[in-house]
Image (tube, rainbow, N blue to C red):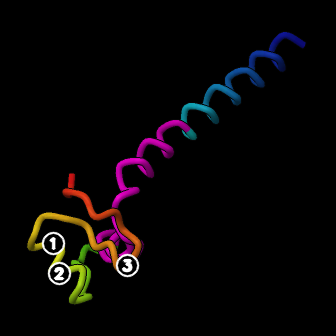
């Protein structure tokens, strides 16, 4: 009975730790547009003209849904 409780506690701790790490990763990329995130995951740069223009200014593309703030 005690081993089942320990197993359940360890499972919950593992779940919440993983959820916390994923939330931090999402928070880091929250300023980027979805198209830029998708291209970045594929190892490419976004090919939208508006995104390229914003990147030259060191910002994220607001037109595509990103926050118009400096890239991190």
Q: Which residue is mark 1?
A: 55
Crowding at dot 1, Cα within 10 Å, few <14 / some 14-19 / many 20+, comes out as some
Sequence-first disc among 1 and 3:
1
The local secondary structure at tag 2 comes to helix
Q: Secondary structure at mark 1?
A: helix
The residue closer to the viewer here, 13 or 27, is: 27
Image spot of residue 37 (x, y percent): 36, 69
Q: Residues within 10 Å of mark 2 (few under 14, many from 20)?
A: some
Q: Is residue 62 left or right of residue 13?
A: left
Residue at mark 2 to residue at mark 1: CA–CA distance: 5 Å
Magenta segment boundaries in residue numbering: 20-41
User: Front-most of 55 and 19?
Assistant: 55
The residue nearer to you, when weighing 22 against 29, is 29
Asked whether disc 3 touches disc 2, contact meaning CB atoms under 8 Å apart, the reply is no
Q: Quadrant of residue 44?
A: bottom left
- In reply to whether residue 25 is colored magenta, the answer given is yes
What number is the disc on residue 52? 2
Q: Callout 3 environment at 10 Å: few (<14), some (14 to 19), or many (20+)?
A: some
Q: Main secondary structure of the magenta part?
A: helix
Residue 55 placement (x, y as % from top left)? 15, 72
Q: Is residue 4 left or right of residue 56?
A: right
Q: What label sits on residue 4 in the rendered view?
A: none
């Amino acid at each position: 009975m005690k081993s089942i409780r320990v197993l359940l506690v360890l499972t919950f701790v593992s779940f919440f730790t993983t959820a916390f790490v994923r939330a931090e990763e999402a928070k880091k990329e929250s300023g980027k547009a979805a198209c830029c995130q998708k291209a970045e995951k594929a190892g490419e740069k976004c090919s939208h003209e508006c995104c390229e223009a914003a990147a030259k200014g060191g910002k994220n593309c607001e037109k595509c849904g990103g926050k118009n703030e400096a890239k991190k």
